[in-house]
Amino acid sequence: MMDMIIDDLGIELWRIPVVVISAIGIYLGFMLLVKIFGSRVLSSMTASDAVVVIMFGAVGGRVILGHPPTLATGLIGLLSLMLLEASFGSFRRFTGWGRQLDRQPVLVVAHGHMLRDQMRHSHVSRTDVFSAMRRAGIGSLEQIQAMVLEPTGTMSVIREGQLLQVEAFRGLRGCEELGLEQSDASES
């Protein structure tokens, strides 16, 4: 009985590096896929998006833990993922690589007009735009001065008529559509 419990909870020493390498591979693979396909899939999820995210977790977990999964492999896998996340966070902060690794914010609506090329590039649908409008309490596109898909996958909505600070829009893909120049924007 005790041997069965140890088998179910423990791990053979040779499996530890396999679990760690698998965790690194899944982490890097997931980061690459999010970079390629966009962070939108991780934000406001539809039912199909939720299914995909759950499947990512299931596939990733099985790859990391291997067969048979045990408590020890699970803890080693989670520890590996947490250390990777902490390491990449520090790496981004100290090297400036965050700008290359993270997605760029994208302007998807400017002065009441959907920017179709930007939306297509960012995998944003008309339904996504209308949903963000409703969440912001806006009833028509004409009331939107700017809608931005943020690197986190959320949508920021700025009402028409608000002053825009140029610095807040630097690095925004499509910002030229807003017609911002130093003299046009508030410097506060």
Image (cartoon, helix red, strand yellow):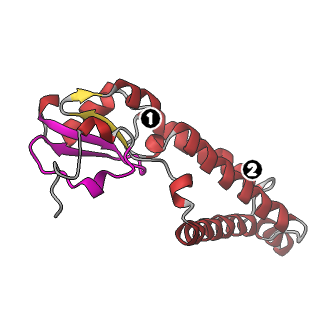
Which residue shows up at 32% across the image and 41% down it? 175
Mark 1 and mark 2 in contact? Answer it, CB < 8 Å: no
- Where in the figure is residue 173, as x and y percent of width and height? 39, 41
Total count of labels: 2
Q: Secondary structure at mark 2?
A: helix
Determine which residue is flagged by label 2: 63
| Near-viewer residue (185 or 183) | 183
On screen, residue 16 above or below 62: below
Amino acid type of the residue tagged 2 in the rendering:
Val
- Is 59 part of what is drawn in magenta? no
For the record, the magenta segment spans 143-172
Which residue shows up at 24% across the image and 34% down it? 110
The residue most toward the front is 183
On screen, residue 110 above or below 126: below
| Near-viewer residue (184 or 132) | 184
- Where in the figure is residue 103, as x and y percent of width and height? 48, 48
Determine which residue is flagged by label 1: 122
Q: Of label 1 and label 2, which has the lower sequence position?
A: 2
Q: Secondary structure at mark 1?
A: helix
